[in-house]
Image: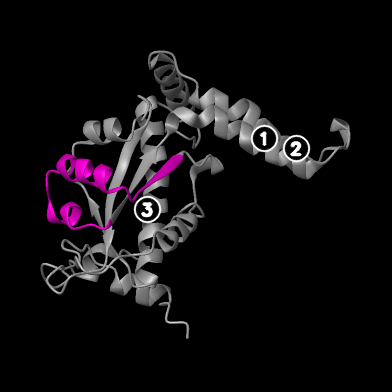
Amino acid sequence: MNTEKNVTEAIQYRRSVRVYDKDKDIDPEKVRKCIQNAVLAPTSSNLQLWEFYHVTDSEVLKELVEACLGQNAAKTAKQMVIVVARRDLWRKRARSNRDFLLKNIGDKPREEYSKREKFALGYYTKLIPSMYAEFLGLLGWIRYVFFWVIGLFRPVYRQVRRSDLRIVAHKSAGLAAQNFMISMAAIGYDTCPMEGSDTARIKKILNLPMGAEITMTIGCGIRDEKGIYGPRFRVPFEEVYKAV
């Protein structure tokens, strides 16, 4: 019998669970499948500038508990998933997109490429490098001023500095994290995205390179009966919903 929740049910079931049942384990393979759902999330330019570290090793979990400041959502978690933004991998991911496009185009001569095919290839071989290439942050500011001037005369994309592109990468990683948590809720597994953590220590524990950035550390398990600290509170919908 299929007891998996539908989307609305999963969203309503999902809570930030602070204490997990110590007697109930979760299946690592099921968690892995939820991470497979995470990578289907929308992502800027399809660059997929993310990585997911699925932690099941007890010793690594102990280190992560300390890095998460000893909070219960980490201390009682059966597993953890660390969502990492990898803006620094833009060259590799752009090449992957280019190679995928070329594979689908096939062996036909370049002069037979459609306008859409030419545009898509140019996007990953010319536009993306022009947007992501950096030199001590200076190129980003040059792009910013250039597009700001153009923006005086017509609408233009303005998120072109290094700080802007960091935000873009974290937004995509955040969308993937939500996919993951809703997928977990759908199968009756619980999660808690933890903001309070020492991200520098987490990077060291996972042996991440300098360019990697922690987007979210997520504790996973099955909720204890006291695992949710109170009823759900949301400000009135009318306060946040604006019909235009």
Q: CA distance from mark 1 to mark 3?
A: 26 Å
Residue 98, placed above or below residue 240:
above
Residue for badge 1: 98
Which of 244 and 106 lies nearest the eye of the viewer?
Answer: 106
Snapshot quadrant of residue 117: top right
User: Mark 1 vs mark 3: which is more N-terminal?
Assistant: 1
Quick check: 158 above or below 80?
Answer: above
Residue 7 picture location, percent across and down? 42, 73
Please report the residue visible at 27 percent of the width from the left and 42 percent of the height from the top: 60
Of the numbered discs 2 and 3, the one sitting upstream in the chain is 2
Report the residue marked by disc 2: 102
Q: Are marks 2 and 1 in contact (CB under 8 Å)?
A: yes
The front one of 70 and 211 is 70
In magenta, the rendered stretch is 50-78
The three-letter code of the residue at mark 3 reads Ala
Q: Amino acid at mark 1?
A: Arg
Q: Mark 2: which amino acid?
A: Leu
Give the alpha-carbon distance from disc 2 to disc 1, as whole Å: 6 Å
Residue 69 in the image, given as x and y percentages of width and height: 12, 43
In the figure, residue 20 lies in which quadrant?
A: bottom left
Whether residue 26 appears in magenta in the rendering, the answer is: no
Q: Secondary structure at mark 1?
A: helix
Percent coordinates x, y for residue 190 in the rendering = 28, 65
